[in-house]
Amino acid sequence: MKPDFKFLIAHPAHFIALGFGTGLVPKAPGTFGTMLAIPIYFACAAVGGNYLVAAMVTLLFILGVWASAKTSKALGIADHGSIVIDEIVAFLLVMAFVPSGPSTHLWMVTAFVAFRVFDITKPWPIGVADRSIKGGFGVMFDDLLAALLSIVFLLTIRAISMGSPA
């Protein structure tokens, strides 16, 4: 089944799981879901800083587990490509680690590309989690691992670019 607007609004779980509509994009819905995390991050950071970002990640992760399970069941596919709440939540977390300053946009692009590469290629341990952890938690968890690898990548690149102290 290919979800449409009628499916999107049929249940709150579908609306959440399909990334508030971004999962309906015909090509690369995961990329569009990832992009949606950027304005959500800036809105949360502007209102409540990284505390609100952390609260939003936690809330959306919990809602995502529920919504992904319900929507996967309705679609008949365990992790349908239109389910993008996992990308939104995971990249929202990554955004909290993007360095601020004059190079913020470059860091954001680097973070975005790193996250998409890890999410799509699923290197260890992401691939193991993707294959072995099922249900709504499994849908969300492998992207959380992609976020963590992206954060490690960002922090490593930042440390290298700053040079080591003498």
Image: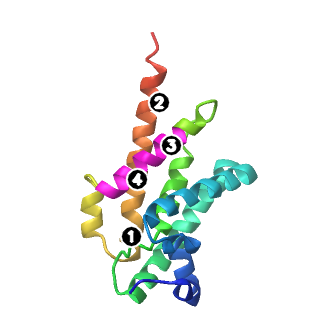
Q: Mark 2 or mark 1, which has the lower sequence index?
A: 1
Q: Check residue 139 in the rendering and tell me which mark sits there, or answer none.
A: 1
Q: Position of residue 162 (x, y in %)?
A: 49, 22
Q: Which residue is mark 3?
A: 109
Q: Secondary structure at mark 1?
A: helix
Left or right side of 144 for 35:
right
Whether 116 is among the magenta residues is yes
Q: Which residue is mark 4?
A: 116
- Amino acid of disc 1: Val
In this rendering, which labeled residue sits more in front, label 2 or label 4? 4
Quarter of the image holding residue 68?
bottom left
Left or right side of 22 for 115:
left
Q: Label 3 neighbourhood size at 10 Å, few (<14), some (14-19), many (20+)?
A: few
Which residue ends up furthest to the top in the rendered image? 166
The magenta stretch spans which residues? Answer: 107-121
Q: Mark 2 or mark 4, which has the lower sequence index?
A: 4
